[in-house]
Structure formats: C-alpha cells, structure tokens
Amino acid sequence: LISDWGAFAVIPVTLSIALCWVAHFLDIGNNRVRLYFYVIVMLAVIGYYAMHGSTITDVPILLCLLIILLSRHNDRRLVILVAVSYIFYLFESAFFVRFLGPDTEQIVFSRIALGFFCLLSATLISIYFMRIGNRNAGEKEQLLKEVEDAKDETKRFLSNMSHELRTPINVVNGISELMLSEKRSKEDTENLLSISDAAGRMRRQVSDILSYSEIQSGYFRLSEDDYEIVSVVNDAVGSIFGREEQGLDFAVDISPDIPRILRGDSKRIKKLIIILTDNAVKFTQKGHIKVGYDYRENGLYIYC
C-alpha cells in the first residue's frame, strides 16, 4: 500500500487469511492438512511481494522467520519447501518481472547470495534441532513405556501376592480360633491368641495392599448404601479388641446427633476405624484409648 502497487492485493490476502481462520476454528481437515494450507497461503503472499523489483532481496528474511516457526512442528519437508521456494521467486523475478539481468547492480546479487547463505544456515540448523528433538522424543516415549510397564507389573505382583497370602492367613486365623474354642492351658491359650492376633493384623495388611493395587489400577470404587454406624463401629472395634490389649482401657463415644442410618461405603468406613484404632493400640503403652464419632454438616467425623 505504501509503495502504491499492492492495493488490489488487499482483498485476496484478506480473504485467504479469513479462510485460514475459518479452517482453524471449524477444525476442517486434520492438523497436518491445515498446516500445509497455511504455509501455501504464506508462500503465495511472499511470492507476490517478491514480484516487485528489489523486494526479492528482502524475501530471505521472511523465509528464515517462517523456517524458525515451522521447525517447531518437526516437519522437515515443510522446512525444505520454504527454503527451496526462494529459487522459484528468483526465477519469477528474472523471467517474469525482468528485474534480474545483466544490468542489475552488483549489490543486489550480493544481497541475494547473502540471502541464500542465511536460508541454508537456517534450514540446516532447523533440521539438526528437529532431529535432536525427534531423538529425545523417542527416548522419552521409550522411558515412559518402560515406566508404565513397570507400574503394570507392580500392580499385577501386588494383586497376585495379596490373593496368594490371603488363603494361608485365613487358614491360620480359622484354625487358631477353632483351637481357642476348646479348653486349653493358660500358656497355650496365650500363644493361640498371639497367633490369632498376628494373623488378623496380617490379614488387614493384605487388605490394604489390595486396596492400594486397586487405586493404582484405577479399579477403586466407593459404593453407596445405607448402614448403621453402631453396627459398623461394633464390628470394627471387635476385630481389634477381641481381648484385653496390653492392659489398655478402651472407650467408644458416639454422638447422639449422628443419624441412625447413614449413606456411604460402610466397608471403607470400617476400614478407616480399624486403621485408626490399630495404630492407637500399637503406639499406646499405657492408659486408655478413646474413639469418638461425631456428625458434621459435611459428613461423619471420626477421631481417636
């Protein structure tokens, strides 16, 4: 517009840009097709700019900028296409515009040679960094695959190990409880209680491992059903304090504000109570343990 030779080109250039935006927002075609379309539009506009005499010496600057932008897409063919297009612009300027010829000043050819050098350097540097980027991307993808495989293997191992351990633990626990139902000497009874207690703790640990493997594998789901908090508390506390623990006193405080029927995952609630109580027993040498249950607006509140 400033040079008074590009007024009529405003309309086709504007329409081409608008078409690019329409293709982008409407997601026409895939990303690769749209990218090639954008590049062709840009090269056409640059080609029109190169048709006006000395402007041919400014084209390498635009092409170098375009090469830098396209190098981010890791497409070497596009980079080479942009670099080679300068040859066609020179051909256009020499045979159609008749700007380049024997009478052309030497400084113009010097600037064209400098443009060739800059384009060649930009192309080689872009291809080099794209090659490094592709290699790093391949190594990163391989590492991610190995990490995912290791995670899957760990999940399978934890799941299989947990299931394999559960059977013998249940056998030990069942037999010890069966033997406790018979009359035994005080020493045998204490030994059987220790065995039963150890088996119970091991069973809870295996259950925790199973829950962990479910969380890691994405299969962990919380159920929603109605339950009575008193029943859940009795089951949980009974599994820990089936007998006197280390001479500790134990108290349960259930707030009267708690509704008789609650909705949620009763199995997970029971598990949380067992974990809290078990840790309290483990780290309390003397005195008493108190487990409280209160009702807040956002749900059940458990403290130990």
Image (cartoon, helix red, strand yellow):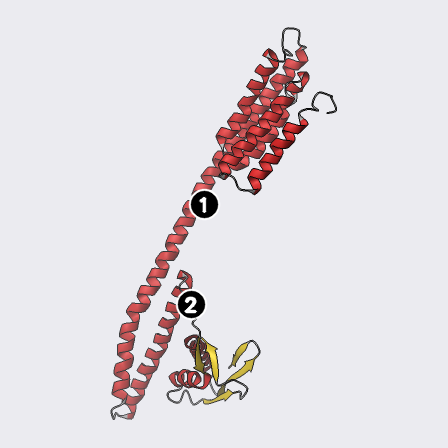
Tell me residue 93's x, y (percent).
61, 15
Q: How many marks?
A: 2
Compute the Cα span from label 2 to label 1.
32 Å
Q: Position of residue 255 (x, y in %)?
A: 53, 87
Could you tell me if residue 124 is visible in this image?
A: no
* Residue under the image location 48 percent in, 80 percent down: 262
Q: Are marks 2 and 1 in contact (CB under 8 Å)?
A: no
Q: In the figure, 132 relative to 283: above or below?
A: above
| Relative image position of residue 280 (x, y in whole percent) | 47, 81
Q: Which residue is mark 1?
A: 140
The disc label shown at residue 272, or none: none
Of marks 2 and 1, the one in the foreground: 2
Image position, residue 94 (x, y; %): 60, 12
Q: Is residue 240 left or right of residue 190?
A: right
Q: Is residue 10 above or below residue 199?
A: above
Residue 45 seen from this side: yes
Say left or right for 7 vs 19.
Answer: right
Q: First in sequence: mark 2 or mark 1?
A: 1
Near mark 1 (Cα within 10 A), the count class, few <14, some 14-19 or many ≥20, is: few
Judged from the image, the secondary structure of the residue bearing numbered disc 2 is loop
Q: Residue at x 26, y 92 (%)?
A: 185
Q: Nearer the viewer, residue 159 or 25?
A: 25
Is residue 19 or residue 261 the one in the foreground? 19
Asked if 215 appears above or below 197 in the picture, the reply is above
Amino acid at circle 1: Lys
Please name the residue shown 68% across and 28% down the image: 10
Q: Which residue is mark 2?
A: 221
Quarter of the picture holding the N terminus: top right
The residue under label 2 is which amino acid type? Arg
Element under label 1? helix
Dot 2 surroundings within 10 Å: few (below 14), some, or many (20 or more)? few
* Pick the front one: 276 or 220: 220
